[in-house]
Amino acid sequence: MKKSISRIIGVIMLIVAFVFIMFALNHPEKSFPWNNTITWLLYGVYFLVAVVLLIAPKIKK
């Protein structure tokens, strides 16, 4: 994957996460149909992938 594409995808993922958090804070009545542990696990994996996509282009081979 090219460096610029990786950065663009990482930034878009972080923007989507920020928008989702803003929506979730304004609508606490909505929830997922599964356990909170699964939800937090999904959040962690999503954040980890976004960070890896942002950091990976900076690491030299």
Image (cartoon, rainbow, N blue to C red):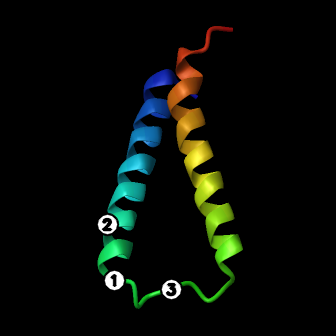
Q: Please, is residue 56 above or below residue 13 in the view? A: above
Q: As shown in the figure, which amino acid type bears the numbered disc 2?
A: Met
Determine crowd level at label 2: few under 14, some 14-19, many 20+ residues with C-alpha closer than 10 A.
few
Q: Which residue is label 1 attached to?
A: 27
Q: Earlier in the sequence, mark 2 or mark 1?
A: 2
Residue 43 horizontal/vertical position (percent): 58, 60
Q: Residue visible at 67% across and 85% down?
A: 34
Q: Is residue 14 left or right of residue 2?
A: left
Q: Earlier in the sequence, mark 2 or mark 3?
A: 2
Q: Residue visible at 64% across and 77% down?
A: 36
Residue 37 horizontal/vertical position (percent): 70, 72
Q: As shown in the figure, which amino acid type bears the numbered disc 1?
A: His
Q: Which residue is label 2 attached to?
A: 22
Q: CA distance from mark 3 to mark 1?
A: 9 Å
Q: Secondary structure at mark 3?
A: loop
Q: Please, is residue 17 above or below residue 58 in the view? A: below
Q: As shown in the figure, which amino acid type bears the numbered disc 3?
A: Ser
Q: CA distance from mark 2 to mark 3?
A: 14 Å
Q: Which residue is label 3 attached to?
A: 31
Determine crowd level at label 1: few under 14, some 14-19, many 20+ residues with C-alpha closer than 10 A.
few
Picture quadrant where residue 8 is located: top left
Q: Residue visible at 50% across and 31% down?
A: 54
